[in-house]
Structure formats: C-alpha cells, structure tokens
Amino acid sequence: MRIDVIGGGPAGLYSAILLKKSFPDSTIEVVERNRADDTFGFGIVLSDETLGNLRAADAESHAEIAANFAYWDDIYVQYQGHVMKSSGHGFSGIRRLTLLEILQRRAAQMGIPVRYQTDDSGLEAHRGADLVLAADGINSAVREGWRDAFGPSVDQRTNRFVWLGAKMNLPGFYYSFREHAGGVWAMHAYQYTEGESTIVIETTDAAWRASGLSITDEAATVALIEKVFADDLKGARVLSNRSHWRQFPTINCRTWWNRLDGIPFVLLGDAAHTAHFSIGSGTKLALEDAITLHGALLSKFGAGAKSATPQAIDAALAAYQDVRGQEASRIQHSANVSLVFFENVARFWKMDPVQFNVSLLTRSKQITYDNLKMRDAGLVTEATRWWNRNEAKRLRIAQTGTDPVTGKRTDTPSWLDAPPMFAPFRLRDMWLPNRVVVSPMAQYSAVDGVPNDWHLVHYGARAQGGAGLVFVEMTCVSPEGRITPGCT
C-alpha cells in the first residue's frame, strides 16, 4: 500500500508516523515545499487533553515532546493598570521548530523518507498512490487547485494581527490590553521555552492604519509594539520572523476528501479548516485530525494491512470526516465567539476590571461560570460577590433589612452570595425574583385564539421550576394572522 503525504508540518509528519506504526509494510513518503528548518512563528500551545491524546497515539514522540514543554496553570490579564490572575487552566507551550524536529526524528527512526524543497501538489506525482494526504497548510495548494472538488469557503475577519516573539519568561498565559492610535490593542502571550515567549498582537483595522503600520516594515512593527506594551515587556526584546500583519481567514470545506482523477485525496489541519488563534487550537486540530484519520483507516483496513480496496478507503475517509467534522465545527464555533470578543473589545472598555476579567475568560463559552468555579473557586466567589453587591446598589436594594422582592426581613439576602442568575432584576416597574427566563413552545391548543386550561397547566408547570419570568407563546394580531387554528 502506497500513501503519499503532502506537507511536512505537524499534521503531515504525525499522520505518517501513526500510519507507519499500523501498516509497517506500506510505502509512505512525505514531501515538503520548504526546508527542514524553515518554520514560521515561534511557539505553539497544547492543552492537557491534547497531550493525553498524543500519549495514547504514540508514546515515544509524546515523551520527547513532554520533555520540552513549558507548562503553566495560570492566566494573567492586564486591563487598565490592573493585573488579575486565575488558575486551573492547564496548558503547555513548545517551540514550533522543536516540535517539528521531534517528529522529523521519529519519522526517520521509522524509515519514513521526507523530501524537502519539493512541491508535489499536482496529480502526476501521485499516480499509483492508494491514498494522498494533503496537510499543506492554510494556503493549501491541493485545496485551492481543486476548489470544485473540496468546496472551500473563507470568512476573512476584520481585525489585524501579527505573530512575534519576545526574549522573556512569563509565569503563565498573559493577556494585556492597551490603548493606542484610537483603538484597543490586545496582546496574547505565553512562554514556550526558557527565556522565550510567543506574543500575538491584534487590533482593529482602523487602529492599525492610524498607527502607520500599513505602510511600514517588520522593524517598525517591533518598535511600535515595544513602545505600546513597554510596561508588559519590561525591557524584553521583541523578535520578528516573517511577522507580517494579516487578517484571520476562517476556512471551511464542503468536503475534506475526494477522488481527483481516481486518486483519493484527503485534507488535514489548516488545509481543511481553521480556528482563530485566540483559543490556541490550530496545531491541536491538526494533530487530532491525524489521530482520527489513522483510527478510521485502521478500523477499515485492520492492523498490518498490505492493501485496501477503493471502497474501504472511501469508507474510512467518510468516517474520518464524520467524526472530525463535528469536533472541528464545535471548536470553530467557540473560536468564532472568541474572536468576536477581541474584534469588539472596545465595547467592554468601561467595564470594571472584575467584570472584564470574567468576560474574557468565559468569552468562548467553552469555559462557563460553573466550569470556571471548578478551575478557580476563589476567583468566582470574589466575582460573584462583586457583581451581586454592585447590582444591589444599582437596583437600590438594601443589602441588609427588608428584601423588596420577598418582603422578608433578612440581614443578608440569600441571593447575594448565589450565582448572578439568581439576583433580582427590575423590568421597568416589574420586579423579577431572579434572571431565569423560560420561553415555552407554541401549543397550538387555543380555541378561536383564546388560551384555555391547557395553557394554564403548561405555563404553570414551567413556573413551578422557579423561573423569574415565563414568556407565553406568540400572539397573533388578528385571526387572519394565525398560522394554525390553534394559535393564540
């Protein structure tokens, strides 16, 4: 069985390693258009969950990867002069070049040839291959060369961003927000080895243009970042490496695999999909794509298979996309919610530091109030106390004495230390005992537009749960406006 791999990045190399382990008699070759030591960017970040997946897939490479990680548990947020810390996050950083070198050595140990400075994205080079893996990155020549076959779509985001490095140590993941040129500039930073950290800077297109960076070079970028974030860098030197300002493209494909003139091609990593860097999932997605593709092929072929039918290959590729497509969509959704926060961070610029910190940490909805409490109970307790007492002042509710909602005498209203969803709310002149809202389904049980006992029971059942507000179903403005005879 012959398997060709286009792209010598993490996705391509890791796929080749896993496939060679399960199909040792197969002929696997990797081609890469750049040199072996060419790499763009600085460090990458992986979660504890991803590290566990790597350990299970290939313990040998995982051991070397883990030995080169810088690990952190904390996130620091600098906002308007306040630095806030939260714990329990569990991430690791590693130099991108180090990761590539580890995978290159592992591939060499397994007898997998890697040809560098070679562009074999055309069909002729792959005649006779049983399967071709296209792991050729965000600018995939395979995907773009056969757009009709893969159906890519690109959502070009509005913010400008640049990848840089800094000669500095960081105690954890570090965010900083600074004002400059009429906009808010965000720094995402993390250490990946002793004395070196990755920093990603992003801001609005308007602020980027107002700063003059649209007509300058990398040296001007470095100089400006060292000035704007001087208090964060503390004299550390900023490094560039083909550090050009870009706008992030969120890429999706109608299908991740197809037969091109009879040859099965499959996309992995950024060639198939992208996720915004603010949730740090690009390399994670690529490596886990490789793991899932390997698992799909193994389940259809069986370990040690020397050949595979076209039907088995197609079934494996369909299973790969079915499994990974769902996970990629989930991560992309979280990434899109996260990037919107950074695109609109100026909207939150008047928030209290406590509120801003929690909003930032929970922006992607992957971390919820309850999940954050599991990670850092102290932070959530402090934020809850601040929010509820601030709301009590805003709503003019006495924090001791008589609770205007319940009418009961109390020294400390019960909701003051409860999650904010249980705080009272005033909707014009109507007081709600909490902020839980239930919107029932339409029942289509009205008679001539008039609700009846069925509705009373239905709404009453929802109210019994303790919701502060229960909405009723849609009410039409005239008999002619009803969708069904049972509508109200």
Image (tube, rainbow, N blue to C red):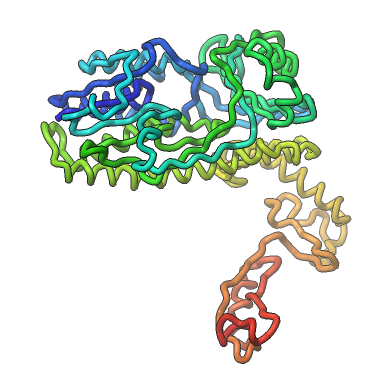
Q: Residue at x 66, y 80 (%)?
A: 476
Q: Position of residue 213 (x, y in %)?
A: 69, 20
Q: Nearer the viewer, residue 2 or 233?
A: 2
Give the position of the N terminus as an image quadrant: top left
- Furthest residue to the bottom? 448
Q: Residue at x 72, y 45 (%)?
A: 384
Residue 409 in the figure: left or right of residue 141: right
Residue 179 in the figure: left or right of residue 401: left
Q: Residue at x 22, y 27 (%)?
A: 126
Decide if residue 177 is in sight here. Answer: no
Residue 235 in the figure: left or right of residue 399: left
Give the position of the C terminus as an image quadrant: bottom right
Q: Is residue 234 above or below residue 346?
A: above
Quadrant housing residue 291 = top left
Q: Position of residue 278 (x, y in %)?
A: 57, 32
Q: Position of residue 91 (x, y in %)?
A: 51, 27
Q: Residue at x 23, y 18 (%)?
A: 112
Total count of labels: 0
Q: Nearer the viewer, residue 318 or 119?
A: 119
Q: Position of residue 370 (x, y in %)?
A: 59, 46
Q: Nearer the viewer, residue 103 or 476?
A: 476
Decide if residue 352 is in sight here. Answer: yes
